[in-house]
Image: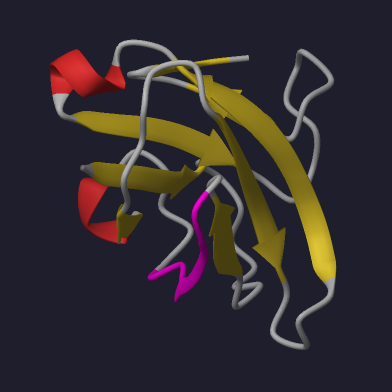
């Protein structure tokens, strides 16, 4: 299944050179965030992962030195039916006080 992770801020003009880290019950993967153009699907990091309904997934941002910038968790909810999951993460908190917004196929 494809897990898509996008940067959650549209107007961040500073390139932070972030890496996205995804941890599932089975493994941990890291990928460079291609850009910080949040709504643009070509700027999302895409992971090929095995996700099962109800599992907890941790998604984190690391800076170019490997230092944790932010992280959060989502529960798989509907991704198996959709055949993909999507989340948005940022280095600063969203309006709801979270760094991670669980979207399609995931829930907080």
Quadrant in the rendering for residue 3: top left
| The residue positioned farthest toward the front in the image shown | 26
Residue lying farthest to the bottom in this orientation: 65
Question: Total number of numbered labels?
Answer: 0
Q: Residue at x 80, y 33 (%)?
A: 93
Query: Is 59 situated above or below 65?
Result: above
Residue 29 falls inside the magenta stretch: yes
Please check the rendered image and state whether residue 24 is part of the magenta-colored stretch, yes or no. Answer: no
Instruction: Pick the residue in front: 45 or 75.
Output: 75
Q: Quadrant of residue 64?
A: bottom right
Tell me where the magenta segment starts and ends, as one range. 26-34
Between 85 and 90, the one lying in front of the other is 85
Figure check: 39 above or below 23: above
User: Which image quarter: residue 92?
Assistant: top right
Position in image of residue 95 (x %, y %): 75, 17
User: Is residue 85 placed above or below 27 in the rendered structure?
Assistant: above
Q: Is residue 9 visible in the rendered structure shown here?
A: no
Question: Residue 47 location in percent, x, y?
Answer: 32, 57
Residue under the point 50% across and 41% down = 10
Q: Is residue 108 above or below residue 44?
A: above
């Amino acid at each position: 299944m494809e897990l898509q992770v996008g940067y959650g801020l549209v107007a961040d003009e500073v390139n932070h050179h972030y890496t996205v880290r995804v941890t599932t019950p089975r493994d941990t993967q890291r990928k460079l965030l291609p850009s910080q153009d949040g709504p643009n699907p070509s700027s999302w990091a895409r992971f090929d992962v095995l996700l099962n309904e109800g599992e907890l997934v941790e998604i984190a941002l690391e800076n170019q030195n490997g230092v944790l910038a932010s992280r959060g968790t989502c529960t798989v909810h509907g991704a198996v039916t959709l055949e993909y999951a999507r989340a948005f993460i940022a280095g600063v908190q969203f309006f709801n006080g979270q760094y991670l917004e669980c979207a399609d196929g995931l829930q907080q």
